[in-house]
């Protein structure tokens, strides 16, 4: 039977911290992070994330894409990538409604092995990031949640 070794979570609610956060195209930004205790080389890391985001409407057809990443040890492109996924929405002429934004939610679950070079009993930090691409604008509205657990 699997045993829970460590658990960590971080949640940024709507309107807290720097939310809402406008994304600049092409720039990977940090949303939140957690630390997990890597008790031995035989553990498995499970990561869960949920991010509320909004596509900004316009009179032109747009396809904003937001790439969400989980990285270990840092939040720059040089840091090891654990997982990435892209969420997008098409905003065409038929989608224009009398609101200012479209609310969207991205959720992910990923299992990973800890860093091979990690000394048992040390902590590793995991980072949740977002990067805008495509056409149009997007805002991280929240909530932003990152949960991790270590099981053996």
Image: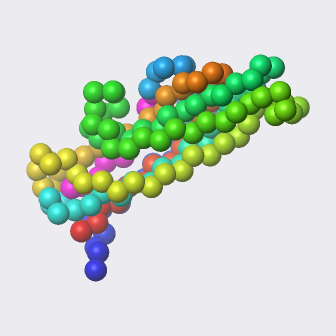
Q: Is residue 34 inside the magenta stretch?
A: yes
Residue 6 position within the rendered picture, expressed as x and y whole percent measured from the top left: 30, 62
At 48% across and 20% down in the image, what residue appears? 26
Please indicate, yes or no, whether residue 58 appears anywhere in the rendered image: yes
Q: Give the position of the C terminus as an image quadrant.
A: bottom left
Residue 146 position within the rendered picture, expressed as x and y whole percent measured from the top left: 45, 49
Give the answer, above or below, for where 42 lies relative to 65: below
At 67% across and 36% down in the image, what residue appears? 89
Residue 1 position within the rendered picture, expressed as x and y whole percent measured from the top left: 28, 80
Give the answer, above or below, for where 21 lies relative to 12: above
At 77% across and 19% down in the image, what residue appears? 60
Residue 115 position within the rendered picture, expressed as x and y whole percent measured from the top left: 19, 47
Q: Quadrant location of residue 32?
A: top left
Q: Quadrant location of residue 120?
A: bottom left
Give the answer, above or below, for where 141 lies relative to 151: above
Q: Residue furthest bottom?
A: 1
Q: Magenta part of the protein: which range?
A: 29-38
Give the answer, above or below, for where 113 lies relative to 62: below
Q: Is residue 117 inside the magenta stretch?
A: no
Q: Is residue 67 left or right of 102 when viewed as pictured? A: left
At 83% across and 27% down in the image, what residue appears? 93
Which color mode does the image show?
A: rainbow
Q: Is residue 89 left or right of 68 when viewed as pictured? A: right
Q: Quadrant location of residue 88?
A: top right
User: Closer to the camera, 44 or 126?
Assistant: 44
Per the picture, the main secondary structure of the magenta-coloured stretch is: strand
Q: Is residue 137 left or right of 69 when viewed as pictured? A: right
């Amino acid at each position: 039977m699997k045993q829970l070794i460590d658990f960590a979570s971080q949640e940024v609610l709507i309107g807290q911290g720097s939310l809402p956060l406008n994304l600049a195209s092409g720039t990977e930004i940090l949303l939140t992070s957690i630390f997990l205790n890597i008790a031995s080389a035989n553990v498995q890391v499970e990561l869960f994330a949920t991010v509320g985001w909004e596509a900004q409407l316009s009179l032109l057809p747009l396809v904003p894409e937001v790439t969400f990443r989980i990285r270990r040890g840092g939040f720059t492109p040089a840091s090891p990538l654990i997982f990435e996924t892209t969420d997008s929405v098409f905003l065409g002429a038929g989608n224009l409604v009398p609101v200012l934004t479209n609310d969207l939610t991205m959720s992910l679950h990923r299992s990973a092995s800890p860093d091979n070079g990690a000394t048992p009993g040390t902590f590793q930090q995991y980072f949740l990031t977002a990067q805008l691409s495509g056409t149009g604008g997007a805002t991280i509205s929240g909530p932003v949640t990152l949960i991790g657990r270590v099981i053996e």
